[in-house]
Image: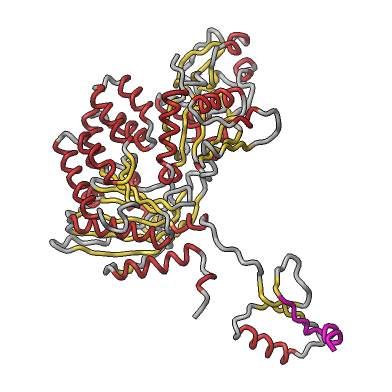
Amino acid sequence: MINIALPKGRLGEKVYSMFEAAGYECPSIKENNRKLIFENSDCGVRYFWVKPSDVAIYVERGAADIGVAGKDILLEYSPDVFELLDMNTGKCRMAVAAKKGFHDNTDKTLRVATKFVNIATRFYADKCRDIDIIKLNGSIELAPILGLSDVIVDIVETGTTLRENDLEPIETIVQISSRLIANKARFRFKADKIEEIVNNIKRYGIKND
Amino acid sequence: MFDTNILKNEEKAVFSLRSLYGRYGYKSYKMGKFEEYELYSRNRDFLVSENIIVFNDTDGRLLALKPDVTLSIIKNSKDETGCVQKLYYNENVYRVSPRTHTFKEIMQTGLECIGDIDIYNVIEVICLAAESLSVIAPEFVLDVSHMGILSAIVDSCTSDKELKKQIVAFAAQKNTHDIKALCAENNIDEEVCGRLCDFIGIYGEMGSVIEKLDKICCDAKSKEAYNELKFIYSLIKGTAFEKNIHFDFSIANDMNYYNGIVFQGFIEGIPDSVLSGGQYDMLMHKMGRKSGAIGFAVYLDVLEQLSVHTAEYDVDTLILYDDKTDIKELMKKVNEMTQNGTSITVQKQIPSKLRYRHILNLSGKGRENND
Protein backbone atom coordinates (compact mmCIF):
# COMPACT_ATOMS: atom_id res chain seq x y z
CA MET A 1 0.00 0.00 0.00
CA ILE A 2 1.34 3.44 -0.94
CA ASN A 3 0.28 6.36 1.26
CA ILE A 4 -0.15 9.53 -0.78
CA ALA A 5 -0.50 13.03 0.72
CA LEU A 6 -2.42 15.37 -1.55
CA PRO A 7 -2.76 19.14 -1.06
CA LYS A 8 -6.30 20.17 -0.11
CA GLY A 9 -8.11 22.46 -2.54
CA ARG A 10 -8.41 23.05 -6.26
CA LEU A 11 -4.81 22.07 -7.01
CA GLY A 12 -5.22 18.83 -5.04
CA GLU A 13 -8.28 17.88 -7.07
CA LYS A 14 -6.35 18.49 -10.28
CA VAL A 15 -3.45 16.42 -8.99
CA TYR A 16 -5.81 13.60 -7.96
CA SER A 17 -7.24 13.53 -11.49
CA MET A 18 -3.67 12.96 -12.76
CA PHE A 19 -3.28 9.96 -10.44
CA GLU A 20 -6.70 8.76 -11.60
CA ALA A 21 -5.72 9.06 -15.27
CA ALA A 22 -2.56 7.10 -14.48
CA GLY A 23 -4.66 4.19 -13.16
CA TYR A 24 -4.73 4.92 -9.42
CA GLU A 25 -8.37 5.87 -9.02
CA CYS A 26 -10.19 5.91 -5.71
CA PRO A 27 -13.90 6.71 -6.37
CA SER A 28 -14.73 7.33 -2.69
CA ILE A 29 -12.57 10.47 -2.79
CA LYS A 30 -15.25 12.19 -4.90
CA GLU A 31 -18.02 11.57 -2.37
CA ASN A 32 -19.15 14.74 -0.69
CA ASN A 33 -18.22 14.10 2.95
CA ARG A 34 -15.70 15.15 5.59
CA LYS A 35 -13.54 12.06 5.44
CA LEU A 36 -9.81 12.69 5.23
CA ILE A 37 -8.50 9.24 4.24
CA PHE A 38 -9.53 7.30 1.12
CA GLU A 39 -8.30 3.87 0.15
CA ASN A 40 -8.42 1.63 -2.90
CA SER A 41 -6.75 -1.65 -2.02
CA ASP A 42 -7.13 -2.93 -5.60
CA CYS A 43 -4.77 -0.22 -6.85
CA GLY A 44 -2.70 -0.34 -3.67
CA VAL A 45 -3.13 3.34 -2.86
CA ARG A 46 -4.36 5.33 0.14
CA TYR A 47 -4.88 9.07 -0.31
CA PHE A 48 -5.23 11.74 2.31
CA TRP A 49 -5.86 15.45 2.10
CA VAL A 50 -3.57 17.74 4.05
CA LYS A 51 -2.88 21.47 4.07
CA PRO A 52 -0.64 22.18 1.02
CA SER A 53 2.20 23.54 3.14
CA ASP A 54 2.11 20.37 5.31
CA VAL A 55 2.51 17.82 2.48
CA ALA A 56 6.32 17.96 2.66
CA ILE A 57 6.23 17.39 6.44
CA TYR A 58 4.03 14.28 6.10
CA VAL A 59 6.37 12.90 3.47
CA GLU A 60 9.64 13.83 5.19
CA ARG A 61 8.47 12.23 8.43
CA GLY A 62 7.27 9.10 6.63
CA ALA A 63 3.55 9.39 7.46
CA ALA A 64 3.10 9.48 3.67
CA ASP A 65 5.31 7.54 1.24
CA ILE A 66 4.82 10.10 -1.51
CA GLY A 67 3.00 13.41 -1.95
CA VAL A 68 2.58 16.41 -4.17
CA ALA A 69 3.95 19.76 -3.01
CA GLY A 70 4.64 23.11 -4.66
CA LYS A 71 8.25 23.96 -5.48
CA ASP A 72 7.75 27.12 -3.37
CA ILE A 73 7.24 24.99 -0.24
CA LEU A 74 10.19 22.75 -1.13
CA LEU A 75 12.48 25.75 -1.60
CA GLU A 76 11.27 27.46 1.56
CA TYR A 77 11.51 24.51 3.96
CA SER A 78 14.16 22.35 2.20
CA PRO A 79 12.71 19.03 3.37
CA ASP A 80 15.04 16.03 3.01
CA VAL A 81 12.98 14.18 0.36
CA PHE A 82 13.36 12.85 -3.17
CA GLU A 83 11.84 15.09 -5.84
CA LEU A 84 10.89 12.55 -8.48
CA LEU A 85 8.70 14.38 -10.96
CA ASP A 86 7.65 17.81 -12.16
CA MET A 87 3.85 17.43 -12.38
CA ASN A 88 3.69 20.38 -14.80
CA THR A 89 0.69 21.83 -12.98
CA GLY A 90 0.13 24.56 -10.40
CA LYS A 91 2.42 26.72 -12.48
CA CYS A 92 3.31 30.19 -11.26
CA ARG A 93 6.43 32.11 -10.32
CA MET A 94 8.05 33.49 -7.18
CA ALA A 95 8.64 37.17 -7.83
CA VAL A 96 9.63 40.46 -6.28
CA ALA A 97 6.86 43.04 -6.64
CA ALA A 98 6.56 46.69 -5.70
CA LYS A 99 4.36 49.75 -6.20
CA LYS A 100 4.26 50.88 -9.84
CA GLY A 101 7.18 53.16 -10.60
CA PHE A 102 9.19 51.93 -7.58
CA HIS A 103 12.82 52.99 -7.64
CA ASP A 104 15.21 50.83 -5.60
CA ASN A 105 17.47 53.09 -3.56
CA THR A 106 20.52 50.84 -3.15
CA ASP A 107 21.96 53.27 -0.61
CA LYS A 108 19.66 51.97 2.12
CA THR A 109 18.43 48.68 3.56
CA LEU A 110 15.60 47.21 1.50
CA ARG A 111 12.47 46.31 3.48
CA VAL A 112 11.04 43.03 2.16
CA ALA A 113 7.65 41.66 3.25
CA THR A 114 7.01 37.98 2.56
CA LYS A 115 5.65 34.64 3.67
CA PHE A 116 8.74 33.01 2.14
CA VAL A 117 11.49 34.23 4.47
CA ASN A 118 14.14 31.69 3.45
CA ILE A 119 13.66 32.12 -0.30
CA ALA A 120 13.77 35.92 0.01
CA THR A 121 16.79 35.87 2.31
CA ARG A 122 18.75 33.57 -0.02
CA PHE A 123 17.80 35.62 -3.09
CA TYR A 124 19.07 38.89 -1.64
CA ALA A 125 22.10 37.26 0.04
CA ASP A 126 23.24 36.11 -3.43
CA LYS A 127 23.06 39.75 -4.52
CA CYS A 128 24.87 40.89 -1.32
CA ARG A 129 21.93 43.22 -0.69
CA ASP A 130 21.20 44.24 2.90
CA ILE A 131 17.53 43.63 3.66
CA ASP A 132 15.12 43.96 6.54
CA ILE A 133 12.84 40.95 6.30
CA ILE A 134 9.23 41.30 7.46
CA LYS A 135 7.45 37.97 7.91
CA LEU A 136 3.73 38.16 7.10
CA ASN A 137 1.20 35.35 6.95
CA GLY A 138 -1.28 36.81 4.44
CA SER A 139 -2.40 39.89 2.46
CA ILE A 140 1.23 40.51 1.56
CA GLU A 141 0.19 43.04 -1.11
CA LEU A 142 -0.89 45.45 1.61
CA ALA A 143 2.67 45.93 2.92
CA PRO A 144 4.07 48.27 0.23
CA ILE A 145 0.74 50.11 -0.11
CA LEU A 146 0.77 51.02 3.58
CA GLY A 147 4.51 51.69 3.62
CA LEU A 148 5.30 48.66 5.77
CA SER A 149 7.81 47.46 3.17
CA ASP A 150 9.51 48.62 -0.03
CA VAL A 151 8.91 45.36 -1.90
CA ILE A 152 7.22 42.00 -1.44
CA VAL A 153 8.35 38.50 -2.37
CA ASP A 154 5.35 36.37 -3.24
CA ILE A 155 3.80 33.95 -5.68
CA VAL A 156 2.48 35.52 -8.88
CA GLU A 157 0.08 33.49 -11.00
CA THR A 158 -1.73 35.87 -13.36
CA GLY A 159 -0.68 39.16 -11.76
CA THR A 160 -4.34 40.29 -11.36
CA THR A 161 -4.12 40.88 -7.58
CA LEU A 162 -0.97 42.92 -8.08
CA ARG A 163 -2.50 45.01 -10.88
CA GLU A 164 -5.71 45.66 -8.94
CA ASN A 165 -3.61 47.01 -6.07
CA ASP A 166 -1.42 49.18 -8.26
CA LEU A 167 1.59 46.89 -7.85
CA GLU A 168 3.77 45.23 -10.47
CA PRO A 169 6.26 42.36 -10.55
CA ILE A 170 9.79 43.69 -10.96
CA GLU A 171 11.91 40.53 -10.90
CA THR A 172 11.32 36.78 -11.15
CA ILE A 173 13.11 34.70 -8.54
CA VAL A 174 12.14 31.20 -9.65
CA GLN A 175 9.48 29.37 -11.68
CA ILE A 176 7.16 27.24 -9.55
CA SER A 177 5.16 24.08 -10.27
CA SER A 178 3.91 21.06 -8.32
CA ARG A 179 6.40 18.27 -7.68
CA LEU A 180 5.92 14.64 -6.76
CA ILE A 181 8.07 13.96 -3.71
CA ALA A 182 8.95 10.75 -1.86
CA ASN A 183 10.27 9.87 1.57
CA LYS A 184 13.89 8.78 1.14
CA ALA A 185 13.66 5.75 3.45
CA ARG A 186 10.23 4.58 2.24
CA PHE A 187 11.48 4.79 -1.34
CA ARG A 188 14.10 2.15 -0.52
CA PHE A 189 11.46 -0.37 0.55
CA LYS A 190 8.78 0.50 -2.03
CA ALA A 191 10.94 1.56 -4.98
CA ASP A 192 9.19 -0.65 -7.57
CA LYS A 193 5.68 0.62 -6.79
CA ILE A 194 6.76 4.27 -6.46
CA GLU A 195 8.70 4.13 -9.74
CA GLU A 196 5.66 2.50 -11.39
CA ILE A 197 3.42 5.36 -10.19
CA VAL A 198 5.92 7.99 -11.38
CA ASN A 199 6.21 6.37 -14.81
CA ASN A 200 2.44 6.00 -15.22
CA ILE A 201 1.81 9.62 -14.24
CA LYS A 202 4.55 10.69 -16.65
CA ARG A 203 2.91 8.66 -19.40
CA TYR A 204 -0.82 9.08 -18.77
CA GLY A 205 -1.31 11.78 -16.13
CA ILE A 206 0.68 14.77 -17.26
CA LYS A 207 -0.66 16.98 -20.02
CA ASN A 208 2.13 19.07 -21.47
CA ASP A 209 0.94 22.53 -22.38
CA MET B 1 21.06 -12.23 34.78
CA PHE B 2 18.40 -9.68 33.92
CA ASP B 3 15.47 -9.83 31.54
CA THR B 4 16.74 -8.42 28.18
CA ASN B 5 13.17 -7.44 27.27
CA ILE B 6 13.51 -4.40 29.50
CA LEU B 7 16.20 -3.00 27.17
CA LYS B 8 15.23 -0.31 24.69
CA ASN B 9 15.98 -0.85 20.99
CA GLU B 10 19.00 1.46 21.09
CA GLU B 11 20.40 -0.25 24.20
CA LYS B 12 20.08 -3.69 22.62
CA ALA B 13 21.76 -2.34 19.47
CA VAL B 14 24.74 -1.00 21.45
CA PHE B 15 25.41 -4.42 23.02
CA SER B 16 25.02 -6.27 19.72
CA LEU B 17 27.19 -3.83 17.77
CA ARG B 18 29.98 -3.75 20.36
CA SER B 19 30.11 -7.52 20.28
CA LEU B 20 30.07 -7.54 16.46
CA TYR B 21 32.88 -5.00 16.02
CA GLY B 22 34.97 -6.68 18.74
CA ARG B 23 34.75 -10.00 16.86
CA TYR B 24 36.34 -8.36 13.81
CA GLY B 25 39.24 -6.95 15.84
CA TYR B 26 37.99 -3.37 16.14
CA LYS B 27 39.21 -1.77 19.37
CA SER B 28 36.95 0.37 21.50
CA TYR B 29 37.94 4.05 21.43
CA LYS B 30 36.69 6.18 24.33
CA MET B 31 36.71 9.93 23.90
CA GLY B 32 36.08 12.99 26.02
CA LYS B 33 32.98 15.07 25.39
CA PHE B 34 34.95 18.20 24.45
CA GLU B 35 37.29 19.02 21.60
CA GLU B 36 39.27 22.09 20.53
CA TYR B 37 36.88 24.27 18.50
CA GLU B 38 39.58 24.93 15.91
CA LEU B 39 39.35 21.35 14.63
CA TYR B 40 35.77 21.98 13.50
CA SER B 41 36.26 25.52 12.24
CA ARG B 42 38.91 24.18 9.82
CA ASN B 43 36.65 21.38 8.55
CA ARG B 44 33.21 22.94 8.81
CA ASP B 45 31.94 21.48 5.52
CA PHE B 46 32.56 17.95 6.75
CA LEU B 47 30.11 18.38 9.62
CA VAL B 48 26.49 17.31 9.22
CA SER B 49 25.30 20.50 10.90
CA GLU B 50 27.39 23.66 10.95
CA ASN B 51 26.23 24.87 14.35
CA ILE B 52 28.46 23.93 17.25
CA ILE B 53 28.08 24.45 21.00
CA VAL B 54 31.18 26.41 21.97
CA PHE B 55 32.48 27.52 25.37
CA ASN B 56 35.64 28.77 27.06
CA ASP B 57 37.58 26.39 29.28
CA THR B 58 38.97 27.70 32.57
CA ASP B 59 42.28 28.50 30.83
CA GLY B 60 40.52 30.50 28.09
CA ARG B 61 40.81 27.84 25.36
CA LEU B 62 37.83 27.68 23.05
CA LEU B 63 36.26 24.22 23.29
CA ALA B 64 33.26 22.60 21.65
CA LEU B 65 30.84 19.88 22.64
CA LYS B 66 31.67 17.25 20.01
CA PRO B 67 29.42 17.53 16.93
CA ASP B 68 31.34 14.68 15.26
CA VAL B 69 33.60 11.77 16.19
CA THR B 70 35.51 11.02 12.97
CA LEU B 71 37.57 14.24 13.02
CA SER B 72 38.80 13.52 16.55
CA ILE B 73 39.80 9.98 15.61
CA ILE B 74 41.75 11.19 12.55
CA LYS B 75 43.43 13.90 14.63
CA ASN B 76 44.81 11.21 16.91
CA SER B 77 45.80 8.80 14.14
CA LYS B 78 49.30 8.26 12.75
CA ASP B 79 50.47 7.20 9.30
CA GLU B 80 52.04 3.74 9.46
CA THR B 81 52.92 2.15 6.15
CA GLY B 82 51.20 -1.18 5.58
CA CYS B 83 49.13 -0.95 8.77
CA VAL B 84 45.42 -0.46 9.30
CA GLN B 85 44.07 0.86 12.57
CA LYS B 86 40.59 -0.51 13.36
CA LEU B 87 38.52 1.33 15.96
CA TYR B 88 34.92 1.55 17.10
CA TYR B 89 33.23 4.06 19.37
CA ASN B 90 29.98 4.70 21.17
CA GLU B 91 29.63 8.41 21.87
CA ASN B 92 27.11 11.20 22.14
CA VAL B 93 27.42 14.03 19.65
CA TYR B 94 25.69 17.42 19.70
CA ARG B 95 24.11 18.66 16.50
CA VAL B 96 21.30 20.88 15.31
CA SER B 97 18.36 18.86 14.11
CA PRO B 98 17.45 20.00 10.58
CA ARG B 99 13.78 19.51 11.49
CA THR B 100 13.49 21.30 14.80
CA HIS B 101 16.41 23.72 14.32
CA THR B 102 17.44 23.09 17.94
CA PHE B 103 20.44 21.25 19.41
CA LYS B 104 20.03 17.56 20.09
CA GLU B 105 22.15 14.99 21.86
CA ILE B 106 22.58 12.09 19.44
CA MET B 107 23.82 8.68 20.52
CA GLN B 108 26.09 7.32 17.84
CA THR B 109 28.03 4.10 17.41
CA GLY B 110 30.45 3.63 14.57
CA LEU B 111 33.72 2.33 13.34
CA GLU B 112 36.71 3.68 11.47
CA CYS B 113 39.31 1.77 9.48
CA ILE B 114 42.37 4.02 9.01
CA GLY B 115 45.63 3.30 7.20
CA ASP B 116 46.62 1.54 3.99
CA ILE B 117 43.06 0.87 2.83
CA ASP B 118 42.68 -1.80 0.17
CA ILE B 119 39.67 -3.53 -1.35
CA TYR B 120 39.55 -6.06 1.49
CA ASN B 121 39.10 -3.25 4.03
CA VAL B 122 36.38 -1.69 1.88
CA ILE B 123 34.41 -4.93 1.59
CA GLU B 124 34.90 -5.69 5.30
CA VAL B 125 33.43 -2.30 6.25
CA ILE B 126 30.51 -2.67 3.80
CA CYS B 127 29.71 -6.13 5.19
CA LEU B 128 29.98 -4.84 8.77
CA ALA B 129 27.59 -2.00 7.87
CA ALA B 130 25.12 -4.56 6.47
CA GLU B 131 25.55 -6.80 9.50
CA SER B 132 25.06 -3.81 11.83
CA LEU B 133 21.67 -3.20 10.22
CA SER B 134 20.77 -6.89 10.32
CA VAL B 135 21.35 -7.14 14.07
CA ILE B 136 19.01 -4.18 14.62
CA ALA B 137 16.12 -5.30 12.39
CA PRO B 138 15.48 -8.11 9.92
CA GLU B 139 14.24 -5.88 7.10
CA PHE B 140 16.92 -3.47 5.99
CA VAL B 141 18.56 -1.98 2.93
CA LEU B 142 22.15 -0.82 2.54
CA ASP B 143 22.50 1.51 -0.45
CA VAL B 144 25.95 1.82 -1.99
CA SER B 145 27.30 4.43 -4.40
CA HIS B 146 30.70 5.56 -5.62
CA MET B 147 31.75 9.20 -5.50
CA GLY B 148 34.25 8.54 -8.30
CA ILE B 149 31.47 8.09 -10.89
CA LEU B 150 29.41 11.07 -9.73
CA SER B 151 32.44 13.38 -9.66
CA ALA B 152 33.59 12.17 -13.12
CA ILE B 153 30.17 12.91 -14.65
CA VAL B 154 29.78 16.23 -12.83
CA ASP B 155 33.31 17.23 -13.92
CA SER B 156 32.34 16.53 -17.53
CA CYS B 157 29.34 18.88 -17.09
CA THR B 158 31.16 21.93 -15.80
CA SER B 159 34.20 23.28 -13.99
CA ASP B 160 32.15 25.91 -12.15
CA LYS B 161 32.19 25.02 -8.42
CA GLU B 162 28.81 26.59 -7.62
CA LEU B 163 27.13 24.87 -10.54
CA LYS B 164 28.67 21.54 -9.50
CA LYS B 165 27.29 22.02 -6.02
CA GLN B 166 23.79 22.67 -7.42
CA ILE B 167 23.97 19.58 -9.67
CA VAL B 168 25.04 17.37 -6.75
CA ALA B 169 22.21 18.77 -4.60
CA PHE B 170 19.67 17.88 -7.32
CA ALA B 171 21.28 14.44 -7.73
CA ALA B 172 20.73 13.80 -4.02
CA GLN B 173 17.01 14.48 -4.58
CA LYS B 174 16.83 12.27 -7.72
CA ASN B 175 15.60 15.48 -9.28
CA THR B 176 16.21 14.95 -13.00
CA HIS B 177 13.75 17.65 -14.15
CA ASP B 178 15.66 20.47 -12.43
CA ILE B 179 19.01 19.02 -13.58
CA LYS B 180 17.76 19.13 -17.18
CA ALA B 181 16.60 22.75 -16.73
CA LEU B 182 19.93 23.72 -15.13
CA CYS B 183 21.92 22.03 -17.90
CA ALA B 184 19.86 23.78 -20.60
CA GLU B 185 20.30 27.13 -18.85
CA ASN B 186 24.09 26.66 -18.70
CA ASN B 187 24.53 25.19 -22.20
CA ILE B 188 25.72 21.83 -20.89
CA ASP B 189 25.91 19.15 -23.54
CA GLU B 190 22.62 17.22 -23.78
CA GLU B 191 24.36 13.87 -24.01
CA VAL B 192 26.33 14.52 -20.79
CA CYS B 193 23.15 15.73 -19.08
CA GLY B 194 21.31 12.59 -20.21
CA ARG B 195 24.11 10.41 -18.83
CA LEU B 196 23.89 12.19 -15.47
CA CYS B 197 20.09 11.76 -15.33
CA ASP B 198 20.36 8.07 -16.25
CA PHE B 199 23.01 7.63 -13.57
CA ILE B 200 21.02 9.13 -10.68
CA GLY B 201 17.91 7.27 -11.83
CA ILE B 202 19.59 3.88 -11.29
CA TYR B 203 18.24 2.08 -8.25
CA GLY B 204 17.97 -1.55 -7.26
CA GLU B 205 19.69 -4.75 -6.31
CA MET B 206 23.31 -4.76 -7.50
CA GLY B 207 22.87 -7.58 -9.99
CA SER B 208 19.85 -6.00 -11.65
CA VAL B 209 21.48 -2.63 -12.39
CA ILE B 210 25.19 -3.36 -12.91
CA GLU B 211 24.75 -3.59 -16.71
CA LYS B 212 23.03 -0.21 -16.92
CA LEU B 213 25.91 1.25 -14.95
CA ASP B 214 28.47 -0.22 -17.33
CA LYS B 215 26.94 1.76 -20.22
CA ILE B 216 27.08 5.02 -18.27
CA CYS B 217 30.70 4.72 -17.14
CA CYS B 218 32.49 5.48 -20.40
CA ASP B 219 35.47 7.61 -19.34
CA ALA B 220 38.62 6.34 -17.61
CA LYS B 221 37.81 7.79 -14.16
CA SER B 222 34.26 6.46 -13.97
CA LYS B 223 35.31 3.13 -15.52
CA GLU B 224 37.83 2.65 -12.70
CA ALA B 225 35.12 3.32 -10.11
CA TYR B 226 32.73 1.01 -11.99
CA ASN B 227 35.31 -1.79 -11.90
CA GLU B 228 35.61 -1.37 -8.14
CA LEU B 229 31.81 -1.61 -7.76
CA LYS B 230 31.70 -4.63 -10.08
CA PHE B 231 34.35 -6.36 -7.99
CA ILE B 232 32.45 -5.57 -4.78
CA TYR B 233 29.30 -6.99 -6.36
CA SER B 234 31.16 -10.20 -7.27
CA LEU B 235 32.16 -10.55 -3.60
CA ILE B 236 28.68 -9.86 -2.25
CA LYS B 237 26.91 -12.07 -4.79
CA GLY B 238 25.81 -15.28 -3.15
CA THR B 239 26.19 -13.95 0.42
CA ALA B 240 23.30 -13.51 2.85
CA PHE B 241 23.26 -9.77 2.10
CA GLU B 242 22.95 -9.95 -1.69
CA LYS B 243 19.26 -8.94 -1.63
CA ASN B 244 19.77 -6.21 0.95
CA ILE B 245 22.65 -4.33 -0.63
CA HIS B 246 21.48 -2.05 -3.44
CA PHE B 247 23.07 0.49 -5.74
CA ASP B 248 21.67 3.98 -5.34
CA PHE B 249 23.50 6.84 -6.97
CA SER B 250 21.58 9.61 -5.28
CA ILE B 251 23.85 9.18 -2.25
CA ALA B 252 26.08 12.19 -2.67
CA ASN B 253 28.41 12.96 0.20
CA ASP B 254 30.66 16.02 -0.01
CA MET B 255 33.08 15.54 -2.92
CA ASN B 256 35.77 17.52 -1.07
CA TYR B 257 36.02 14.82 1.60
CA TYR B 258 34.70 11.56 0.17
CA ASN B 259 36.33 9.96 -2.84
CA GLY B 260 35.36 6.30 -3.10
CA ILE B 261 32.56 4.09 -1.87
CA VAL B 262 29.76 5.83 0.07
CA PHE B 263 26.73 4.17 1.61
CA GLN B 264 23.58 4.69 3.68
CA GLY B 265 21.50 2.19 5.65
CA PHE B 266 17.74 2.06 6.16
CA ILE B 267 15.48 -0.05 8.34
CA GLU B 268 11.82 -0.82 7.62
CA GLY B 269 9.71 1.29 9.97
CA ILE B 270 12.11 4.22 10.35
CA PRO B 271 11.63 7.16 7.95
CA ASP B 272 15.28 8.31 8.16
CA SER B 273 18.63 6.77 7.37
CA VAL B 274 20.05 4.92 10.38
CA LEU B 275 23.56 4.42 9.06
CA SER B 276 25.86 6.54 6.95
CA GLY B 277 29.46 6.18 5.88
CA GLY B 278 32.08 5.99 3.19
CA GLN B 279 35.70 6.27 2.17
CA TYR B 280 37.13 9.67 3.09
CA ASP B 281 40.77 9.72 1.93
CA MET B 282 40.43 13.38 0.92
CA LEU B 283 39.61 14.39 4.48
CA MET B 284 42.66 12.45 5.67
CA HIS B 285 44.85 14.31 3.15
CA LYS B 286 43.34 17.65 4.19
CA MET B 287 44.33 16.83 7.74
CA GLY B 288 47.91 16.09 6.70
CA ARG B 289 47.71 12.28 6.63
CA LYS B 290 49.03 10.20 3.74
CA SER B 291 46.89 7.15 4.43
CA GLY B 292 43.24 6.54 3.61
CA ALA B 293 40.20 5.77 5.73
CA ILE B 294 36.72 4.29 5.56
CA GLY B 295 34.09 4.11 8.27
CA PHE B 296 30.46 4.58 9.21
CA ALA B 297 28.19 5.72 12.00
CA VAL B 298 24.94 4.19 13.24
CA TYR B 299 22.44 6.75 14.56
CA LEU B 300 21.05 5.01 17.59
CA ASP B 301 18.62 7.75 18.60
CA VAL B 302 16.37 7.09 15.59
CA LEU B 303 15.85 3.48 16.75
CA GLU B 304 13.42 4.92 19.29
CA GLN B 305 10.96 5.11 16.39
CA LEU B 306 10.97 1.34 15.89
CA SER B 307 7.87 -0.23 17.35
CA VAL B 308 8.41 -1.66 20.81
CA HIS B 309 6.45 -4.21 22.76
CA THR B 310 4.59 -2.26 25.42
CA ALA B 311 3.86 -4.15 28.63
CA GLU B 312 0.22 -4.62 29.61
CA TYR B 313 0.99 -3.80 33.26
CA ASP B 314 3.38 -1.40 34.99
CA VAL B 315 3.97 -3.91 37.83
CA ASP B 316 2.89 -7.44 38.67
CA THR B 317 1.78 -6.69 42.23
CA LEU B 318 0.76 -3.57 44.05
CA ILE B 319 1.44 -3.92 47.79
CA LEU B 320 -0.55 -1.60 50.03
CA TYR B 321 0.52 -0.78 53.58
CA ASP B 322 -0.23 1.80 56.29
CA ASP B 323 0.98 2.92 59.73
CA LYS B 324 -0.34 -0.26 61.35
CA THR B 325 1.60 -2.57 58.99
CA ASP B 326 4.53 -4.53 60.48
CA ILE B 327 7.44 -3.11 58.43
CA LYS B 328 9.59 -6.21 59.07
CA GLU B 329 6.87 -8.41 57.63
CA LEU B 330 6.42 -6.01 54.70
CA MET B 331 10.14 -6.12 53.87
CA LYS B 332 10.14 -9.92 54.07
CA LYS B 333 7.25 -10.06 51.58
CA VAL B 334 8.96 -7.56 49.26
CA ASN B 335 12.23 -9.55 49.24
CA GLU B 336 10.38 -12.81 48.67
CA MET B 337 8.45 -11.49 45.70
CA THR B 338 11.26 -9.56 43.98
CA GLN B 339 13.60 -12.54 44.31
CA ASN B 340 10.98 -14.72 42.64
CA GLY B 341 11.05 -12.34 39.68
CA THR B 342 7.79 -10.56 40.47
CA SER B 343 7.83 -6.80 39.98
CA ILE B 344 6.18 -4.88 42.79
CA THR B 345 5.47 -1.38 43.97
CA VAL B 346 4.88 -0.58 47.64
CA GLN B 347 2.39 2.24 48.16
CA LYS B 348 0.10 3.61 50.87
CA GLN B 349 -2.63 4.41 48.35
CA ILE B 350 -3.40 3.09 44.90
CA PRO B 351 -1.65 5.52 42.53
CA SER B 352 -3.92 6.84 39.81
CA LYS B 353 -3.20 5.41 36.33
CA LEU B 354 -1.06 2.57 37.77
CA ARG B 355 -1.65 -0.66 35.85
CA TYR B 356 -1.13 -3.69 38.13
CA ARG B 357 -1.88 -7.38 37.75
CA HIS B 358 -2.51 -8.24 41.43
CA ILE B 359 -2.99 -6.36 44.66
CA LEU B 360 -1.69 -7.42 48.07
CA ASN B 361 -3.15 -5.41 50.91
CA LEU B 362 -0.93 -5.45 54.03
CA SER B 363 -2.50 -2.36 55.57
CA GLY B 364 -4.21 -2.69 58.98
CA LYS B 365 -7.61 -2.27 57.39
CA GLY B 366 -6.80 -4.73 54.66
CA ARG B 367 -5.64 -7.33 57.19
CA GLU B 368 -8.86 -6.92 59.18
CA ASN B 369 -10.80 -7.56 55.97
CA ASN B 370 -8.57 -10.54 55.18
CA ASP B 371 -9.24 -11.97 58.67
Q: Quadrant of residue B73?
A: bottom left
For this rendering, which residue is in front, A156 or A7? A7
Judge by depth and name the residue closer to the eye, B171 or A118: B171
Residue B364 lies in the magenta stretch: yes
Colour convention: secondary structure
Q: Position of residue A162 (x, y in %)?
A: 58, 12
> In the rendered view, would you say B116 is above or below A204?
below
Q: Quadrant of the C terminus of chain A?
A: top left
Q: Quadrant of residue B68?
A: bottom left
Residue lying at the far front of the rendered structure: A42
Residue at the spot 46% in from the left edge and 21% down from the top edge: A206
In this rendering, the answer to whether B7 lies above or below B215 is below
Tell me the residue at 42%/46% (across/down). A189
> Percent x, y for residue A133?
54, 28
Magenta stretch encompasses residue B273: no
**Exactly how many numbered labels are in the figure?**
0
Comparing B53 with B69, the one in front is B69
Picture coordinates of residue B16 (x, y %)? 40, 67
Examine the rendering and report whether any part of residue B308 can be seen: yes
Image position of A129 (left or right of B360): left
Q: Position of residue A100 (x, y in %)?
A: 55, 8
Residue A193 figure quarter? top left
Q: Is residue A207 above or below residue A196?
A: above
Q: Classify residue B106 as left or right of residue B199.
A: right
Residue A120 visible? The answer is: no
Bounds of the magenta span?
A: B358-371
